[in-house]
Amino acid sequence: ALITAVRDWCAGHRLSSLHLLYGDAADLAACDAAGLMRRGQVQFHWTNRDPASGRPFVDFDALLAALTQDKRKKIRQERRKVAEAGVRFRWAAGADISPADWALFYRCYRRTYLEHGNAPYLTPDFFARMARELADAWVLFVAERDGHPIATSLIAVGAHQSGAMEGVDGLHFEACYHQPLDWCIRHGVARFEGGAQGEHKMARALLPVATHSAHWLAHPGFADAVARFLARESAGVDGYLEQLDGRS
């Protein structure tokens, strides 16, 4: 009833489209019944569960022990390179993230986006509002060398941003995966979502997961074209997932 009412409201107000992202099974079933189009995609998630015991990992070494030898060796090499470069990390969560920390993160974030030819779409005001209104949702990882910060990684539920002021071999993986997973294990977090894209995440213990969204488009011709595309894309996504699962 709710999704039907929202769809009708959008149509009545001449809105172009309606989108539901990352719905649960009940949400998506209701969208199917209401005639919305389903789209499947792939993300990479880590689950805090030791396959040997079925319980959460006790520490990062236990996570490494659960991996294949080549992946375990690769992660240890990456971490050793960062440590040998004199880089150390500190963690800050919630209210412990200072205004100076937020300013540092924005500088790293902005520089990294610009270096990749992209506009940094999140503004300083966005981070100021998050620090003020949703402070407890954030965890910041700061890489420092000789007492000077050189890179940051910021995580929240379903969100992840990073940036650096200078390059160190292996630093990206340490800041974006190894440190956050270590923090998750120590704090009993059940799942870390690394987002879409990047099969290299599988080498850092993140596995492929199917995610689904539902869409309604007002223009009949556009909706028909998208529906035909989704029918073709769905077969490709299923094959991609099967291929990734074979390498997990």
Image: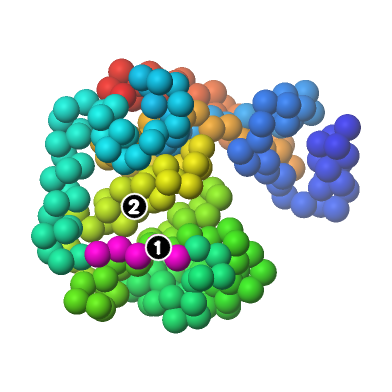
224, 128: nearer the viewer? 128
Residue at numbered disc 2 = 179
Residue 194, position in %: x, y? Answer: 42, 44
Magenta extent = 88-92
Locate residue 176, reporting x and y percent.
34, 53
| Residue plotted at (31% across, 57% down) | 175
Question: Which residue is at a point 44% across and 70% down the rendered structure image?
Answer: 120
Q: Is residue 81 left or right of residue 198?
A: left
Image quarter where the C terminus lies is top left
Q: Secondary structure at mark 2?
A: helix
Q: Nearer the viewer, residue 156 or 95?
A: 95
The kind of residue tagged 1 is Trp
Q: Is residue 124 magenta?
A: no
Disc 1 is placed on an element classified as strand
Residue 114 in sight here: no
Instruction: State which quadrant residue 57 falls in.
Output: top left
Q: Give residue 167's quadrant in the image.
A: bottom left
Answer yes or no: is residue 16 visible.
yes
